[in-house]
């Protein structure tokens, strides 16, 4: 059970790291591009289906993707149920 709790907490950190990395402009030949790619590979299998269910919220000319927030809330609830 402790291993599952640690994995959920680690995935929560990975999702946060992806959110932060998406806001930082990085060219494709920069070393951080590999980190961004690894974070996308780790989170996209979960975020992709969430995006198909929950379309982006339009705020004027900008679209806000709420799927990472929903995923973080879900991970927090799951961690609370399983680990407490």
Image (cartoon, rainbow, N blue to C red):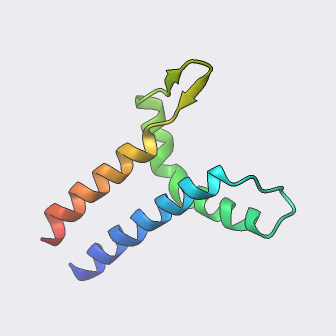
Residue at (28%, 74%) from the top-left corner? 4
In the rendering, at what x and y percent does residue 77 appear? Answer: 22, 55
In the rendering, at what x and y percent does residue 12 appear? Answer: 40, 63
Residue at (79%, 70%) from the top-left corner? 31
Can you say which quadrant of the picture contains the C terminus? bottom left
Residue 48 shown left or right of residue 72 in the figure: right
Residue 13 shown left or right of residue 26 in the figure: left
Q: Is residue 11 above or below residue 60?
A: below
Looking at this view, name the residue that lies furthest to the front: 60
Closest to the observer, 62 or 14: 62
Q: Is residue 75 above or below residue 30?
A: above
Closest to the observer, 26 or 42: 26
Residue at (57%, 57%) from the top-left corner? 20
Q: Is residue 82 above or below residue 63?
A: below
Residue at (30%, 50%) from the top-left corner? 73
In the rendering, at what x and y percent does residue 8 appear? Answer: 33, 68
Residue 6 shown left or right of residue 66 in the figure: left
Looking at this view, name the residue that lies furthest to the bottom: 2
Can you say which quadrant of the picture contains the N terminus? bottom left
Figure label count: 0
Looking at this view, name the residue that lies furthest to the right: 29
Residue 42 found in image quarter: bottom right
């Amino acid at each position: 059970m402790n291993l599952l709790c640690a994995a959920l907490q680690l995935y929560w950190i990975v999702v946060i790291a992806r959110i932060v990395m998406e806001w930082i402009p990085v060219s494709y030949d920069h070393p951080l591009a590999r980190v961004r790619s690894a974070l996308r590979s780790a989170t996209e299998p979960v975020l992709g289906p969430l995006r198909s269910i929950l379309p982006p919220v339009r705020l004027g000319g900008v679209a806000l993707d709420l799927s990472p927030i929903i995923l973080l809330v879900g991970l927090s609830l799951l961690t609370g149920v399983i680990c407490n």
